[in-house]
Image (cartoon, rainbow, N blue to C red):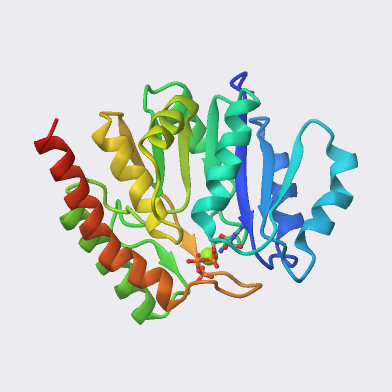
Amino acid sequence: MSDIKSIVIIPTYNESENIIKIIDEVFLLKDNFNVLVVDDNSPDKTSQLVEDKIPFHKERLFLIKREKKLGIGPAYINGFEWAIKNGYENIYEMDADFSHNPKDLSRMQVFLTNNGYDVVIGSRYKTGVNVINWPIQRVLISYFASWYARSITGTPIMDLTSGFVGYKASVIQEVLKEGIMFKGYAFQIEMKFKAYNLKYKLYEIPIIFTDRIRGESKLNLSIIYEAVFGLISMKFGQVFSKMFK
Ligand SMILES: Nc1nc2c(ncn2[C@@H]2O[C@H](COP(=O)(O)OP(=O)(O)OP(=O)(O)O)[C@@H](O)[C@H]2O)c(=O)[nH]1
Ligand SMILES: [Mg+2]
């Protein structure tokens, strides 16, 4: 069991079919992870399920309720600020839909705690393509997105869009100081890009990613546009700021 104060942040929008099961799986791990759910007023009452569970896991389970669906980026930023204020040292991001296997958190914890890394990424593309049940078009789009993000930003990470990541709190603090511009899943690229540019040590561990079985995807075109065009302007921003330093 690890003494490092660690928390898993799970953003949710309509995850009533998954949220209780995934919290239970995290609590079964030996590592003593706490859980913070950040819900954007899900119409399916995801937050009510969490509220009903909190009395059974006082001091381990927490909930932030936001007014409306404002994107995964701002949800995580709220969660990060809360986790830092409450003294967590290792802070994890994980989806609610079981695409990420909670058991991998224990493997990630080893790298973040004992092996001297600052950021540990659960990577679908570290060793080939480890994706289960995604239609081939989806795999190709995701793989291409990762290649595109790597080429534009110059960040040497195979799975830049991964949303299964552990950060040391100090990394998040420094990255937040730089400011985060993206709201959709480009947010995941931006976090890693900024941590890399701040010279933190990033490490990818291979994970097997499984498509969601329950609930619906929230991926839409505006999230994709933000990533495709936003990354170019983010990279330009970095190049210009270096020139005028
Ligand atoms: N709080 C909050 N959570 C969100 C929002 N959008 C997505 N999420 C959550 O973020 C996680 C990832 O979203 P998904 O819908 O699984 O997105 P995805 O993984 O790209 O798409 P699929 O796996 O194909 O369903 C899930 O836990 C969602 O419930 C949002 O606007 N606000
Ligand atoms: Mg998903």
Tell me residue 95's x, y (percent): 57, 56
Indicate whether 152 appears above or below 80.
below
Asked if residue 18 lies left or right of residue 236, the reply is right
Number of marks in picture: 0
Q: Considering the image in quadrants, where does the N terminus appear?
A: top right
Q: Position of residue 209 (x, y in %)?
A: 47, 60
* Coordinates of residue 232 in the picture (x, y in percent): 21, 59
- Could you say which is closer to the camera, residue 148 or residue 22? 148
Left or right side of 210 for 152: left
The answer, for residue 34, to whether it is visible in the render is: yes
Q: Nearer the viewer, residue 141 or 40?
A: 40
Q: Is residue 207 left or right of residue 16?
A: left
In the image, residue 162 sits, relative to residue 9, either above or below, namely: below
The residue that appears at 25% across and 68% down in the rendered structure is: 144
Q: Is residue 130 above or below residue 211?
A: above
Front in this rendered view, residue 239 or 79: 239
Front-lying residue, 78 or 16: 78
Q: Quarter of the image containing the C terminus? A: top left
- Can you tell which quarter of the image residue 195 is in? top left
Write down which quadrant ligand 1 falls in. bottom right
Answer whether residue 145 is visible to the viewer in this image: no
- Residue at the (72%, 40%) spot, across then down: 27
Name which quarter of the figure residue 103 lies in. Answer: top right
Farthest residue in the top direction?
A: 3
For the point 45% across and 25% down, the residue is 170
